[in-house]
Amino acid sequence: MSVPVIPTRILLVGGGGREHALAWRLAREPGVELVLVAPGSAAIATEPQVRCLPNVDPLDGPALAALARAEAVELAVIGPEAPLAAGVADAFVAAGVPTFGPSRAAARIETSKAFCHEVASAAGVRMARAGVFGGLEPARAFAARLAAEGDGVVVKADGLAAGKGVTVCDTLAQAEAALAAQFAGPGPATVVVEERLHGREASLIALCDGREALGLPAARDHKRLGDGDSGPNTGGMGAFSPVPDLPDSVAAELIERVHRPILTELARRGTPFRGALYAGLILTPDGPTLLECNARFGDPETQVLVPRLSIPLGPLLLAAAQGRLAAAARPYGLDGPLLPALPSAAVAIVAAAAGYPGPPRGGDPIGGLDEALARGALVFHAGTSLDPDGTYRTRGGRVLAVVGQGATLAAARAAAERAIERIAFAGLQRRHDIAADAVGGSAPAADQVAMAAGPAPAGGGAGR
Ligand code: AMP
Ligand code: GLY
């Protein structure tokens, strides 16, 4: 039987909370000697076996590739979407560096919502009914038709918009205003108009090697700023895993019905996807439906997922980068489409700066970090800076994710709450209801989603 190939020197691109969690995890795994993070952050640099490179531009592919060669890294991992859109993976691959993160062409599955619809449609993956428009009048006519037929319209900018390109509209008037805003700019615009769907959302992320997909446990993000899903959309104010109403049997089937067909279609087009394929799902009464794809790990989903994995991540990321995921999974006894996870739960609560998701206030000292850690939480930094005297200050919109772990979601949630209560900075914004709906064990059977048809494939992850 083959043995896992461990990447001993890893270069991670990015410097937010997701990258803190990835660096924390990878650096702890057996055999890993060094995790370089470009640019990383002062907080990430405090992790053992981690060295940050604050002066490296995470969008500069040639510079990153040269660095990877000079440092003899065996694996490059790309965290955020902007380097993917800038072609950083292409630069690594051209330099012969095994790379976990898709090419710019394959990352279009995230960077163009119109392309995502096109690929999903060709792959037979269900998404919301949608039209793609380059002008206001036909977009308005389509929105009017959807509004007359159903219960709402969603207006989306085609390209990357840092979480600000989507308007979920209750009325046609709102949709018209959103469309007018999208087409108000001087240049050409492409806008996707969708029927509005209803249901809880879930994030299902799979490691992909161009053909094969291995799913991480399902997670749920909380995108709105305020308690009870009030206020504006954000990058994510908290997350939890597992998701009681998305059981492993359904997650395994979704990997087969969503991720794999999309991989097949991208490969058919000559742009195989190697990296983390994130399916943003909505669990409608008619079954799970794909809302969007991302070409990377979720943030803050990663902060709750990596603590739950029960086998090393590094060898699987390397195998995905090298197109040999199925063979790499064998030594771990994996025979289904899900990675094995610990039976425990994790809940992340984000502490965001004043002003977020608008322009945030920075520079405020952060208190209580040591106390939060002393309460057993993981604290992943997303936007902080470090003074010479050891004081951390806010620097960015989402500042920290405080992660509680426990045998159940209720215990993990209580642990996260106990820890984040210690954190204090001027204007701190956070939600108090992360995972609140999901605590108390499994959701009732009637509340669980089922696939529309067909049996779930056998062989889900072990130990969950
Ligand atoms: P997206 O970036 O496409 O995932 O959109 C961001 C958020 O907008 C999603 O997480 C949903 O909360 C919401 N959303 C997007 N598309 C739809 C839709 N068709 N129906 C209902 N909500 C949607
Ligand atoms: N948490 C949502 C995302 O990573 O896009």
Image (cartoon, grey):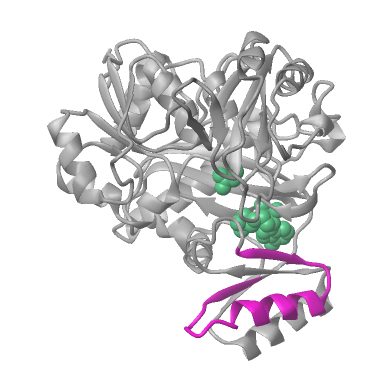
Residue sitting nearer the eye, 239 or 270: 239
* 431 relative position to 83: left or right: right
Identify the residue at horizontal 55%, vertical 16% (top origin): 462
For residue 101, above or below residue 436: below
Tell me where residue 442 sits by quadrant.
top right
* 193 relative position to 56: left or right: right
Q: Which residues, given as a range, are shown in magenta?
A: 165-193
Inspect the magenta stretch and tell me whether residue 187 lies in it.
Answer: yes
Identify the residue at horizontal 76%, vertical 22% (top origin): 421
Could you say where residue 464 lies in the image, as x and y percent from the top left? Answer: 62, 17
Residue sitting nearer the eye, 363 or 270: 363
- Count the labels in the image: 0
Tell me where residue 408 sits by quadrant.
top right
Could you say where residue 416 lies in the image, as x and y percent from the top left? Answer: 71, 21
Could you say where residue 362 lies in the image, as x and y percent from the top left? Answer: 58, 43
Identify the residue at horizontal 71%, vertical 11% (top origin): 407
User: Quick one: which residue is furthest to the bottom in this view?
Assistant: 137
Tell me where residue 101 sits by quadrant.
top left
User: Quarter of the image containing the N terminus?
Assistant: top left
* 351 relative position to 79: left or right: right
Identify the residue at horizontal 86%, vertical 36% (top origin): 446
